Image (spheres, rainbow, N blue to C red):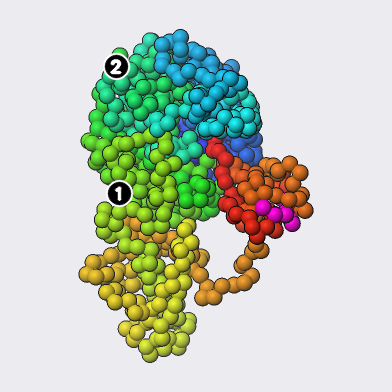
Amino acid sequence: MTIATLLVANRGEIACRIFRTCRDLGITTVAVYSDADADALHVREADLAVRLPGSAPADTYLRGDLVVAAALAAGADAVHPGYGFLSENAAFAAAVQDAGLTWVGPPVKAIELMASKTRAKELMAGAGVPLLAPVDPATAGSDDLPLLLKAASGGGGRGMRIVRELGALPGELLAAAAEAASAFGDGEVFAEPYVERGRHVEVQVMADAYDTVWALGTRDCSLQRRHQKVIEEAPAPGLEEGLRARLHDAAVAAARAVGYRGAGTVEFLVSAEGRPYFLEMNTRLQVEHPVTEAVFGVDLVALQLRVAEGEPLPAPAPPSASGHAVEARLYAEDPARDWQPQTGALLTLEVPDGPGLRLDTGYVGGDTIGVHYDPMLAKVIAHAPTRTEAVRLLAGTLERARIHGPVTNRALLVRSLRHPDFVAARLDTGFYDRHLADLTTPGAGDPATNPGAGDPATAALAAALAEAVRATASRNAPTRFGAWRNVPSQPQVKRYRSEPDGTEHEIAYRTPRTGTPEPYDAPGVRVLTATPDRVALELDGLTRHFDLRRDRDRIYVDTAGASYTFTALPRFTDPATQTDPGSLLAPMPGTVVRLAEGLAAGVAVEAGQPLIWLEAMKMEHRILAPASGTLTALHAAPGDQVEVGALLAVVQEDLDATPVPASVPEETA
């Protein structure tokens, strides 16, 4: 059958990406949207859209019955699930087909067989796919450590724990099972050996109904935070040809073992010694599929639609690979603060375009990042003849991007791509465990690779000069005639706080009779031009340009090699802005999901004890007691919707206690 109208049962970046292929093929597109997404980019880009009442995923995008009803109401004849949400839900796939709609995905049976990691491993063992030997937690000994606990259903890191001490195993099993049950409705957890410094390598497969299975090369996805990928590339670098062939063969065998059709990914863990072990098969399109598309010159969504229409793949073998591609996931999150997701208005999102570059996004400047969904803003992909060229192109592109609004991981991505271990392809899943502190240190990075970047203090100076010009222009406006004084000014002072690290900068400047402000007592600095939007400075003979944008008390400064965000501070601290010692504040808008058992005003708490669980943007945060003491106030209850900075509780601490961070994220979906 020919697909004429397609509903995408998803949102954000992946929905926009699928719509792009549909436009190329002349297929009418249908979006579904929650109330929180009423003005989202994927809704604006679709030909038709159907509302799913509510905002939480459980009430909207995870309601298969509502999505099927939306497809029928819109006159769609096919449904594409994207990734996440219901994409690997066999019952939803069956419901789509039972409604007489075409399912753009693998057979229901294949989804069922791969849905449980424990059943999938049993099946793969029979197909000769290499596996890690399972470990029975009930009989595990010290020789079995370290262990990795994993949820049998679902993914994204939920229900996953690394156990390095035998005494911690019972508690971690209970915690992993509880998380798995909450996230996936299935509390089954299994254990296997944890491979230290292993690489995450996967193979993209594409299969049709005519016994053709393509293995479209390898991808390395080792750079991860909390078991979620951050940077991916194709092909996986540094693999011996024998290992690469073994991975391809194992992936094809896995697909054939379940009668697979469509796009799927077989994931492996490769040990430091080069031994591969099957992890799981994702029966859907992967977030990182663009790097494979770039290297093989294919459109995987177009191939999915072709296979769903009953057509064979265009050739018995996949096309030849060419060059190297790298993808970085741009998140609204603060890596220096336990990857805390961020919300708010995205004022600007401008990523340079050019040969070899691709941007997949669900946002544009002016959109709002809400609390209900994953904080990924975009994927930036670079393709070049060699890995070195692709990595350099991607790092430079991210560096020149203009992103104003919530804190993002952009600086971390640039520093990761330029880290010596990444440049040398020394990759493993412990990269951020080892390097995160250095990569998030204010001022980290090699200025020698970025001579135009300047530094935060110089960027703050540019901000102060631009603000001075703005103020002078305001005073000299016709409606304010007579306010300007034709005398040299005394030094003025402006104070700024760098975001998100909190470093404060105090800038002194003066405005002489020329009207152009200049730094006060700053030898070696000369102001070339200064307007409210752009400043050019000569620093020790080197000219640097700074572009500026102000939004309320935030000032965004962009220069050739870096971007800075400042909050303008009053000259003196306002005592009313101070909070009582021991106050526990909400780190982001979200929902209180539970409290520690017996938690009430007057109870004793221990330093580091989880007191309150807050959920936002698919992440669960534990609010910890900052020190041992007494809970003197409790303002949170399960189900409460709280804003960022809301007072949740107050702990009167024991002066001998050791302070701990007040918020620690649990997992992401």
How packed mark 2 is, by other alpha carbons closer than 10 Å (few <14, some 14-19, many 20 or more), is few
Q: Nearer the viewer, residue 253 or 427?
A: 427
* Circle 2: residue type: Ala
Query: Which of the 4 image quadrants contains residue 175?
Result: top right
Which element type, helix, strand or loop, lies under badge 1?
Answer: helix
x then y, percent, for residue 636: 71, 50
Query: Which of the 4 image quadrants contains residue 518?
Result: bottom left
Q: Nearer the viewer, residue 565 or 513?
A: 565
Q: Which residues are magenta?
A: 628-636
Residue 139 shows up from this direction? yes
Which residue is rendered at x = 45% and y = 88% of the image?
482
Which residue is rendered at x = 52% and y = 73% of the image?
570
Name the image quarter holding the C terminus. Answer: top right
Q: Mark 2 or mark 1, which is nearer the start of the sequence? A: 2
Q: Of tags 1 and 2, which is closer to the observer?
A: 1
Q: Looking at the image, how many numbered discs can be counted on the residues?
A: 2
Query: Which of the 4 image quadrants contains residue 56?
Result: top right
Q: Does residue 193 sit above or below 225 in this rendering?
A: above
Which residue is label 1 attached to?
396
Q: Does residue 408 sit above or below 112 in this rendering?
A: below
Q: Is residue 212 magenta?
A: no
Which residue is label 2 attached to?
317
Which residue is rendered at x = 57% and y = 40% of the image?
666
